[in-house]
Image: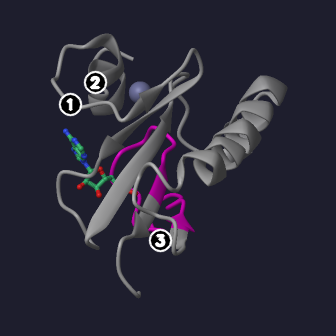
Amino acid sequence: MDNCIFCKINRGEINSKKYYEDEDFFIISDINPKARLHYLMIPKHHYALIGEQTEKDVEILGKMLNKLSKLAHELGLQDGYRVIINQGENGGQEVPHLHVHVLGGEKL
Ligand code: AMP
Ligand code: ZN
């Protein structure tokens, strides 16, 4: 998607440190952190809502959560974290490209 901020980060058109990247998704820090550590896990395929997922998207979201558990120590999240996916207007979703908020680094 041409104007999507997360697609632009994926393409390298906007600079952002990637803490992890593979063929399916990447992890960056949220620009406006709501906790001491606030990451965004972003699938490379552009879609907005869980209800729009292809079978492959379902599989990738599962893999993302599993990978997070394996990266937790490296990301400073070894004592636990909170995972949030905002969906649509009432969910407070501002960027219409599905992403997983990961908050931690302190007791929430
Ligand atoms: P949401 O409200 O769930 O759509 O979350 C969008 C998140 O993206 C917000 O927490 C923003 O702070 C974050 N955000 C917006 N632009 C950037 C950016 N360029 N780099 C990192 N995070 C961003
Ligand atoms: Zn996008």
The residue that label 3 is drawn on is 90
Quadrant containing the C terminus is bottom left
Is label 2's Cβ within 8 Å of ligand 1? Answer: yes
Find the magenta span and give its range.
83-101
Applied colour scheme: one colour
Is label 1's Cβ within 8 Å of ligand 1? Answer: yes
Label 1 amino acid? Ser
The residue that label 2 is drawn on is 9
Q: Image point 55% across, 32% down: which residue?
A: 47
Give the SS element for disc 2.
helix
Q: CA distance from mark 3 to mark 2?
A: 26 Å
Among the two numbered marks 3 and 2 on one chain, the one whose residue lies closer to the N terminus = 2
Classify 10 Å Cα crowding around label 1: few (below 14), some (14-19), many (20 and above).
Answer: some
Q: Is residue 22 left or right of residue 29?
A: right
Q: Which mark is residue 41?
A: none
Q: CA distance from mark 3 to mark 1?
A: 28 Å
Q: Quadrant of residue 62?
A: top right
Q: Quadrant of residue 16?
A: top left
Q: Which mark is residue 16?
A: 1
- Does the CB distance between marks 2 and 1 fall below 8 Å? yes
Label 3 amino acid? Asn
Q: CA distance from mark 2 to mark 1?
A: 7 Å
